[in-house]
């Protein structure tokens, strides 16, 4: 047998072996999972905030589900309220930023303005990056101005109306009940501190609603972000003057505090109020002086013009009327 015949025989045997051992059908492509449907799938915890935010804006205008449910992956099944109460969450301490309920306005002032206090630390990073000399001196002067402004912001709600009556926080306080507030602008938001009997019981943040902002660009974005962050579906309450609710509000609670998200879209902000629950439940007793209705009629005027006390001031001088004809006096005899 020559060399060519050997090579051909070997090649033919190899092909027969490969055919016998190879697959009988062509290989199939691996099945890939279908991409998630953004209209039906629940977003994962890592992207729940941004997905819920963008979805809420679209659904608000299209009639869909305006408030998205938080993802179960964020920490178990989302909590819901029972019996008309706000849902119980593990903690709202993040929203108080280490400030304790019950401190006086003097203690709060010290906490913010003392060396190495809150305002001081706000400027640490700026000063570290500033050039030595005029730039650092300007920042230090600005820091002192902010500290002084915070100290001066304290105002008591006594008898005289204030400019706050024309703002979005007008229903967060009352007059003649030993209430007061302080405020500060920092970290892109305005924070109010509320006191009763010189006890801190509430903090209220005005957070701008803007693209790329921490609470999104719309109220629904803010609510969905909070639902995801707290892993709880907040209780939704519509405006109800009888309950003291002047705008749509969504709330949550823990064992100490309650958090309210107030719709102030007209001001392009969301109001985030965190308050001491024990004080909230006792507000009726802490506010014995009720607000006066400016359109109410003065009681003294009401007593004169209405009811059984209504009298005719000219009645005493008026001649009595008689239905009988007057008698003629007979003429005297001569």
Image (cartoon, helix red, strand yellow):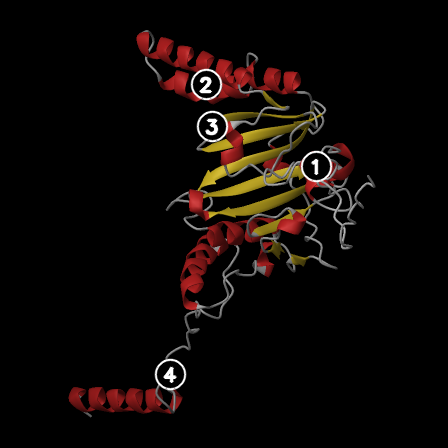
Instruction: Report, in whole angstroms, how far the alpha carbon at label 1 lies from the one at label 2.
Output: 76 Å
The residue identified by callout 2 is 124
SS at mark 2?
A: helix
Residue at position x 45%, y 59% in the image: 56
Residue at position x 77%, y 48% in the image: 328
Of the residues under marks 1 and 4, which one precedes in the sequence?
4
Q: Quadrant of residue 151?
A: top right
Q: Label 1 near label 3: C-beta < 8 Å?
A: no
Q: Quadrant of the C terminus?
A: top right
Of the residues under marks 4 and 2, which one precedes in the sequence?
4
Residue at the far front in the pictured view: 334
Of the residues under marks 3 and 1, which one precedes in the sequence?
3
Of the residues under marks 2 and 3, which one precedes in the sequence?
2
Can residue 99 be seen in this snapshot? Answer: no
Q: Position of residue 117 (x, y in %)?
A: 56, 17
In front here: 286 or 231? 286
Task: Indicate which label's residue lies in the foreground, 4 or 3.
Answer: 3
Q: Quadrant of the N terminus?
A: bottom left
- Side of 145 where 261 appears, left or right: right
In front here: 22 or 106? 106
The residue identified by callout 4 is 28
Q: Label 3 near label 4: C-beta < 8 Å?
A: no
Residue at position x 53%, y 36% in the image: 205
Vertical relation: 56 (above or below) 18: above
Vertical relation: 234 (above or below) 313: below
Q: Position of residue 103 (x, y in %)?
A: 69, 23
Q: Position of residue 45 (x, y in %)?
A: 53, 55
The residue identified by callout 1 is 313
């Amino acid at each position: 047998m020559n060399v060519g015949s050997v090579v051909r025989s070997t090649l033919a045997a190899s092909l027969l072996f490969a055919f016998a051992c190879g697959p009988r059908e062509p290989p199939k492509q691996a099945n890939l999972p279908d991409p998630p449907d953004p209209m039906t799938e629940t977003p994962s915890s890592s992207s729940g905030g941004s997905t819920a935010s963008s979805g809420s804006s679209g659904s608000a205008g299209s009639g869909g589900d305006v408030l998205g449910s938080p993802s179960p992956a964020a920490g178990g099944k989302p909590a819901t309220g029972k019996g008309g109460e706000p849902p119980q969450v593990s903690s709202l301490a993040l929203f108080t930023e280490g400030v304790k309920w019950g401190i006086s306005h003097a203690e709060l002032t010290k906490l913010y303005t003392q060396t190495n206090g809150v305002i001081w630390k706000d400027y640490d990073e700026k000063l570290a990056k500033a050039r030595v000399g005029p730039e650092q001196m300007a920042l230090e002067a600005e820091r002192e101005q902010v500290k002084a402004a915070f100290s001066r912001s304290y105002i008591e709600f006594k008898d005289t109306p204030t400019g706050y009556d024309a703002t979005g926080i007008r229903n967060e306080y009352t007059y003649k009940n030993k209430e007061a507030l302080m405020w500060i602008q920092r970290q892109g938001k305005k924070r109010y501190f509320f006191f009763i009997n010189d006890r801190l019981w509430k903090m209220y943040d005005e957070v701008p609603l803007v693209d790329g902002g921490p609470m999104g660009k719309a109220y629904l974005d803010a609510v969905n972000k909070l639902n995801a962050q707290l892993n709880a579906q907040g209780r939704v309450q519509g405006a109800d003057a009888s309950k003291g609710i002047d705008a749509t509000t969504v709330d949550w609670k823990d064992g100490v505090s309650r958090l309210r998200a107030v719709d102030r879209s007209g001001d392009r902000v969301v109001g985030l109020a965190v308050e001491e629950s024990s004080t909230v439940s006792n507000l009726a007793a802490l506010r014995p002086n009720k607000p006066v209705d400016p359109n109410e009629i003065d009681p003294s005027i009401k007593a004169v013009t209405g009811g059984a006390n209504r009298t005719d001031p000219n009645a005493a001088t008026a001649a009595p009327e008689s239905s009988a004809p007057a008698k003629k006096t007979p003429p005297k005899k001569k």
